Amino acid sequence: MAPRIIVGIVAVACTSVCGLVSTFASFEMVDKVNDKLPETEKFDHLGWYFSKRLRLNRKYRMLYPDGQLLLRVRILTVLMFVCGLVAAWGFGFFAQ
């Protein structure tokens, strides 16, 4: 098997792992924020869209100014996309 294909397979695995760990960190962030919010303002774990994500990020920064979960989610998301690009390169999507 070509080394480029092996790199692509490893990158796909890394993409999946980063996405999964990022999701778990997001769920942990939702749980922490929900612990300090009244019942009417709590976030549901399903049905995410852009403005809801921004609201969660603002609430998390407000309630946990020194919290590291938001940074962790952002780093894992960037790593997920980088690994996805490496996987695309490994499988020849950018070949001429």
Image (spheres, rainbow, N blue to C red):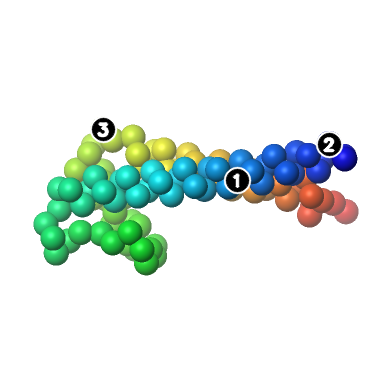
Determine which residue is flagged by label 1: 15
Q: Quadrant of the C terminus?
A: bottom right
Kind of residue indicated by mark 3: Asp
Q: Residue at x 43, y 49 (%)?
A: 23
| Quadrant (top left, top right, bottom left, bottom right) of the N terminus | top right
Q: Which residue is mark 3?
A: 66
In three-dimensional space, the C-alpha distance between marks 2 and 3, rounded to whole angstroms, equals 42 Å
Q: Is the Cβ of the residue at disc 1 closer than 8 Å to that at disc 2?
A: no
Label 2: which secondary element: helix
Residue drawn at (33%, 34%) of the image: 68
**For the residues bearing labels 3 and 1, Cβ distance under 8 angstroms:** no
Q: Nearer the viewer, mark 2 or mark 3?
A: 2
Label 3 secondary element: loop
- Residue type indicated by callout 1: Thr
Residue 55 appears at what percent x and percent y? 28, 57
The image shows residue 78 at horizontal and vertical percentages of 53, 44
Disc with the residue nearer the chain's start (3 vs 1): 1
Counting other residues with Cα less than 10 Å from the Cα at mark 2, is it few (<14), some (14-19), or many (20 or more)? few
Q: How many marks?
A: 3
Q: Secondary structure at mark 1?
A: helix
Q: Which residue is mark 2?
A: 3
Residue at x 24%, y 45% (from the top left corner): 32
Is label 3 or label 1 in front? 1
Residue lying at the far left of the rendered structure = 38
Placement of 58 over or under 69, stated as above or below: below
